[in-house]
Structure formats: C-alpha cells, structure tokens
Amino acid sequence: METRGATAPVLRVSRLASLTVATKQRGAIAVWLGIATALAAWIVLILILASGFRAEDLAAAGHIPLAWTALVVISAVILIGFFTRGVRIDLGRRFPWIVFALSVLVSLGTWLVLAAGNEALAASIYRGLRIPQGIVQFWDMSLVMLSVDCARFGFDIYQDNNGCMQDASIYAPGMVWLRFMPFSLFSQDNVPALGAALIVVSSLALAWLARQSTGSGQIVLAIAAVGAPWVLLLERGNIDAVVLVVLVAGIATTRRWSDSLIAWFVAAGGFWLMGTWKYYPFVLGLALLPVLRLRRGWTVIAAYLIAAFGYLVVTWQNFLFSSQSNSNMIDFGDWAVLGRVPLVARMIDATPGAEGLQVMDIPVIALTLLAITWGVAVARALPMRRMSMAALASAASALYLASVFVAGFGYGYKAAFLLAGVPLIASFLNRGTDQRARALVGSSIAVLVLIAVQSVIMWNTVLATSAGLIAAGFLLGAGTAITLAGVLPAVVKSRQALKA
C-alpha cells in the first residue's frame, strides 16, 4: 500500500512533465512554421518586385509600389507577432451592439442618404472608403432578382439575349427557386426593401461574431464594420452576405441545440441550399463535422454529401458554365480585386490570363499550404477546444479559399468571410506569459492583424490577397485540427461500442 501511495503521485508528475515537454515542442514547431510562412510570403512579394527588372513589362510600374507596401505591412505584422507577450482587452458585454450600430450606420445610413437624393455626399463616403459605387443601389441583388423575374415569366435565363436579359445568369439553378415564394417576394420591385433587410440581418450576424469574441477580436470586427469589403458587400446586396448569414445562423443553431439531430439537419439544409445557388458554398459542409460526436451524427454528413454530389451531377453542365463565367470575369486591376490568378500575373515571367497553372503559381500554393500547416501546429499546441467556433472558422476560410485560391479570383467582398474566423483566433489570446504561450499568442495576433488589414485595404490586390491567403490558410488548419481533435475520440469510442 505504501508503495502504491508513493508511486501514484510520481506517475502523475511524470505524465505532467512529459505533457509539458510535448506542448513546448509543439509550440516551437508552430513558431518555426510561422517563420516559414513569413518567408514564403516574402518570396511571393520579391517575385513581384522582380518583375520591375523586365523592361518589356509596362504594367510593372503600377504594381511595384503596391508590392513594396505589402512587403512593409506584412513585415510589420510579423514583428508585431514576434514581440507580443500577451493581449488582454475587455470592452464589456455591450460592445457587440456598437459593432452592429457601426455596420448599420455606414451601410444603411449611406444607402438612405443616396435614396434621399444626396448623391454627392453618398459618393464622397464611398470614395473615402475607396470602394466602387454600384450603378444602381443594391446592384448585385438587382441582377439576381432580374434573373428570378425572367425565370418566373418563362425565359431561358441561361441563354444570352434571351429576350429578358442580355447576358446569361451565372448562378446555379437553385437560385431561381426563389420564384416559387408567394406574393413574388423575391422580385426586382422589392430590391430596396430586401437590400435594407439584408444589411440589418448581416449586421446582426457581425454583432453575434463580436459577442463570441474577446476584446481584440471585437476591435477587429468593429474596424471591419466600417471597412471597404464589408461595406461593399452590403452596398451591392451581394448574395455572399446571405451565405455568411446562413453559416452564422447554422453554427448558432447547432451550438444552442448541439445534441439535437434535427438542429443539425436544419443547418445542413441551409448549407446545401446555399450550394444550389453558387456551388462553392457546398464547402460549408465542413461546419457539420462536430455532429459526428452524436450517436447517429453520421446520417447528417451522409445526407449532406449525397444531396451535394447529387445536385452537382444533375446540374453538371451548369456547374461548368458557372466556373467558366468566373474565369471570364477575372480582373487584373487593383480595385476591389482578390485572387491567386491576379497575384501570379504580377510576378516575373508570369503570363497574365494564361489558362491552367503556371510555374509562378507554385510559390503561392506553397504559401497557402504552409499557412494551413502553421494553423494546425498552433491548434495542436493549445489545450483549449472551442469546437463550434473552430467549425465556423474552417467553413468560412474554406469559402474564401474556394473562390480566391482554388478558382483563383474573387471580388474584394470575399474578405468578409474571414471575419467568421475572428472568434476562434481571439480565443487563442490571453494564454499566459510563459514562453510557449507567448509564441502562440504571437502567431494568433499576427493572423488577427492580417484579417484587420484585409478588412480595410481592398485597393491593393497584392497586399489584400497575400494577407488573405495567410489568414485563411491558418484558419482552415487551426479550425479543422480542433474540430477533428474533438470528433475523433467520439468516433473511436462509438466504433468500439459497436464492436463490443
């Protein structure tokens, strides 16, 4: 008995020491991966700067200054992360409503100013934010509702010059299901009301994200509420705002009723519906992974995959058309543009507009993969598991990467997707002052600052895309790693129970 009593504390101390050593090693790995990601970003920017040595590259004079700016900003962010020792900010429980008010004031307020006929003041606000003002209010939503109206009247909206629209609709067939809503609710006649409602609902979603965040994350979200990508998203009434709202609503629902399969099926249905509108939102299925902790949670995943792949098969030709339309819209300018393709086009020896991958795509791919690995390493070094926020971050970053990285192009409002990852990153802060914690806090604060940078700067394609790829990669890696770490033990336990 004495031997057992003496041995147990020793074993516990030995296990604690072993865990501490392993955690420190993981922290060190995370730091080195962060440094490797920074080096990869520098290489990408240096390859852009090198294009200035080509006398035949007449466009280099325009984007070389932007690359210098990106190099300085990203280097500054790295230094901020390196010297950060801890971040403790408490803004109070009411601050999320300030985020809501800022979003409504700038987005809805400017729309009301324009609707009242004061075009000069509204244009000044948009110029101050450096966003391109739409030809009409809620321009993107107006185009969508035009396609819904045309489909309601029997026109083939997927043909050019169909008698109702000049250009074929680039949206998936699920979008025109809106024509079956009663009272013609979704129609061009109702665009002003629908656009204003979308601003309010989106602002509420942003406030919910702020409520889930700590002080540092709340500051970033407050900045984003008056930043160019967010205001552009709402000014255009773009459907991506609906995708983001549905993602946040799905996470909020499954977080509130985490043990209810019905709640998970409702969330899955919303995610699937978004995919039937624009295809790439099918990646929202990543947010459903935590359901595998439930006994029959696999049925939600199986149903979602069957429905998603089934829809792709049935509408495959439209998917190809939609993908080609996205490629045809690629803009190589520096005004509300994000994307791997525009970024690579600025590099030395790259061919703007070339089909397929180029040699200069490799550094950008390496940068993104390193950022993903960096996120995984940081998540593995943290004992904390906020699975709902992790699932939210992984799905939101997948939305961003599906467009900006995989498809290669997206307009500046795609940056708004990364705001859904702020609660997870903010939760990594306040981890203490020991060497391991400081290293992880530094990594997290660097990514948080990059999200803040992209939430304001939209006119510099080089900086916005580089910052976005690093932040999105980190969020995808960290979010997925935390989600799987929480799910796998439950899956293994379930399989063992079945075998027994």
Image (cartoon, grey):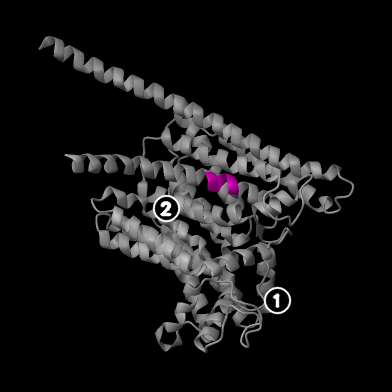
Q: Which mark is residue 237?
A: none
> Which residue is identified by label 1?
120
User: Residue 188: which quarter of the image?
Assistant: bottom right
Task: Indicate the position of residue 480 as horizontal and vertical percent values.
Answer: 43, 45
> Which residue is identified by label 2?
286
Residue 470 among magenta residues: yes
Residue occupying image coordinates x 39% and y 58%:
305
Please tell me whether residue 377 is drawn above or below residue 273 in the rendered image: above
Residue occupying image coordinates x 62% and y 36%:
38
Q: Nearer the viewer, residue 339 or 296?
A: 296
Q: Nearer the viewer, residue 29 or 84?
A: 29
Q: Nearer the viewer, residue 361 or 385?
A: 361
State the SS at label 2.
helix
Task: Check disc 2 and give the amino acid type.
Answer: Leu
Task: Check disc 1 and give the amino acid type.
Answer: Ala
Question: Can you say which quadrant of the picture contains the N terminus?
Answer: top left
Q: Which region of the structure is painted magenta?
A: 469-473
Please tell me whether residue 103 is drawn above or below residue 134 in the rendered image: above
Label whose residue precedes the other's in the sequence (1 or 2): 1
Give the left or right position of residue 274, taking residue 130 as reference. left
Prevailing secondary structure of the magenta residues: helix
Q: Nearer the viewer, mark 1 or mark 2?
A: 2
Residue occupying image coordinates x 42% and y 64%:
310
Residue 403 among magenta residues: no
Question: Can you say which quadrant of the picture contains the C terminus?
Answer: top left
